[in-house]
Amino acid sequence: MKVLQILKERYPDTYEKIIKGEVDKIKPKDEIEKMLLEIFFSNDRRSSKYIDEFFRLKCAKDIVEILGKNLSAKEITEAMSIRDRLRKLDIKDAIVFDFCAGKAIFSLLVAFTLPVRKVIAIDIKKPNIDFSGVRKFEYYEVNLFDKEVEEIIEKEEGRKIFVGIHCCKNLSIRVIELFNKYGDYLFLMPCCVLRTFKNDFWGYIDWVKFLVSKVKKGKVKVEWDWDVWSERNAIIQVMT
Ligand SMILES: C[S@@+](CC[C@H](N)C(=O)[O-])C[C@H]1O[C@@H](n2cnc3c(N)ncnc32)[C@H](O)[C@@H]1O
């Protein structure tokens, strides 16, 4: 599997120990190695191209250093999925809004690897993480339903890319409302459905269709990304 290949390239001593079955003798040298080992030895050894891609990025080391234990492999796959879609666009000088950003893995990936003007993370609760050294990045602790969010958006000039990764329930509806009013591109990966929808795979499909019906402008495309380590893996994309 690919994670083993990365371990072989970057941590040959550890790779040797895995091959010889001397797993108890492995002493990870840094957070990246620790995480790769956790992925390799986890119960779920599905490979994902996003995990491989992430650990090949130069900034992986910085992101692991900033987020430490806050970084999860599942969230890497979600963030990489949207980041890969973004890089296919002409995004030079665009402003990216990461709504319900949480630990801001996606924001960091974009700030470190894409030529956007700025990334703005917004969440009702800013995590206790030191983002101070990150360029082109701002984090606002604001409720998405507050008027202040609109003020933050309005004061930015240029093309606006709206992203919402696993915005629960009506937060996804709110992101679409904001997009209808202010956005140029939308990338929304919804997660938890409203109570009126069934909480199973089919209910999730209905939820996605419902959210699509709320989009009032642009060309809509829905993709299902099976390299994302979550069953909530639909991506609603809108270009205006
Ligand atoms: C499932 S997490 C997703 C986090 C991140 N986007 C990710 O994929 O790793 C949902 C996030 O929504 C945030 N949230 C919940 N209610 C909110 C609100 N009213 N306004 C802004 N953010 C909110 C939570 O604090 C949490 O970080």
Image (cartoon, helix red, strand yellow):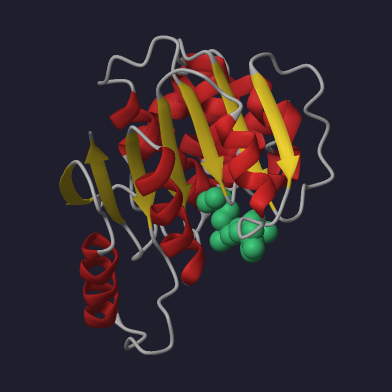
* Front in this rendered view, residue 16 or 96: 96
Residue 94 in the image: above or below residue 126: above
Residue 177 in the image: above or below residue 185: below
* Front in this rendered view, residue 127 or 98: 98
The answer to whether residue 22 of the structure is visible from this angle is no
Question: What residue is shown at x 71% (from left), y 56% (from top)?
Answer: 124
- In the shown orientation, is residue 77 left or right of residue 211? right
Q: Considering the image in quadrants, where does the C terminus appear?
A: top left
Residue 95 in the image: x percent, y percent? 49, 23
Residue 160 in the image: above or below residue 220: above
Residue 158 in the image: x percent, y percent? 45, 18
Image quadrant, ligand 1? bottom right
Residue 192 in the image: x percent, y percent? 45, 73
* Front in this rendered view, residue 220 or 38: 220
Please state the total of marks drawn on the protein image: 0
Residue 175 in the image: x percent, y percent? 45, 53
The answer to whether residue 70 of the structure is visible from this angle is yes
Question: What residue is shown at x 22% (from left), y 72% (from top)?
Answer: 205
Q: Considering the image in quadrants, where does the N terminus appear?
A: top left
Question: What residue is shown at x 41% (from left), y 55% (from top)?
Answer: 177
Question: What residue is shown at x 32% (from left), y 21% (from top)?
Answer: 87
* Quadrant of residue 27 within the rendered picture: top right
* Front in this rendered view, residue 166 or 18: 166
